[in-house]
Image: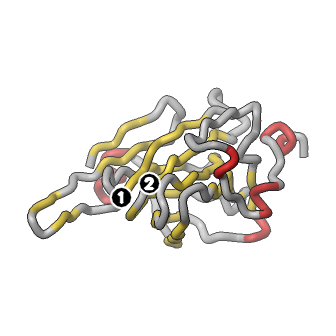
Amino acid sequence: MRIVKHDIEGLLMIEPQVFGDARGYFFESFNAERFLAETSIEITFVQDNESRSKRGVLRGLHFQREPYAQAKLVRVVSGRVLDVAVDIRPESPTFGRYVVTELSGENHRQMFIPKGFAHGYVVLEDDTVFQYKCDEFYHPEAEGGIAWNDPQIGIEWGIPESEIILSEKDRNRPTLKELCEY
């Protein structure tokens, strides 16, 4: 496993070692001992989630408020997404900045997103299967979100706005500035 740090503190790209042959491939998608040794982050995942979506579906930007904030380890089993993590830690020097990474069933990359980030992704291929592990259970009362098209953040989602498919909830999220004014 190779771990690449981003310029935003805490975000990690994980590139597993993939063993392939005529039968297919094998890779270890997570190992707590190796993750701790490589990152000094001790984590226990308590919930795994999976979604299947068609091209154009945008899920996000979501987060859980304290005391139920979640760290996530995200990956794509099949298909492709543009994965986005936005720093929403008010005390952070990178507050409001984001990282975009393509995750796919082919590249096997994973993104570790620590607590204090909003997360979302847009699906680039039909029948994309997205999985993520969380270190805290989902609590509906702690659910939060930011507008996917917040002009101050300025995320380039990689597909035309006319092709974006949103849930009603995600269509009506506040901007980061509006969120901070609460």
Residue found farthest to the right: 182
Q: Residues within 10 Å of mark 1 (few under 14, many from 20)?
A: some
Q: Is residue 71 visible?
A: no
Residue at the image position 83 percent from the left and 55 percent from the top: 172
Residue at the image position 78 percent from the left and 40 percent from the top: 176
Please, what secondary structure does the residue beneath circle 2 have?
strand
Counting from the top left corner in percent of width and height, residue 180 is at 83, 41
- Image position of 180 (left or right of 124): right
Q: Residues within 10 Å of mark 2 (few under 14, many from 20)?
A: many
Q: Nearer the viewer, residue 67 or 105?
A: 105
Residue at the image position 54 percent from the left and 64 percent from the top: 54
Q: Nearer the viewer, residue 11 or 18?
A: 18
**Residue topped by disc 1:** 105
Q: Is residue 164 above or below residue 136?
A: above
Please, what secondary structure does the residue beneath circle 1 have?
loop
**Residue topped by disc 2:** 80
Residue at the image position 44 percent from the left and 43 percent from the top: 12
Q: Is residue 29 above or below residue 8?
A: below
Amino acid on which disc 2 is placed = Arg
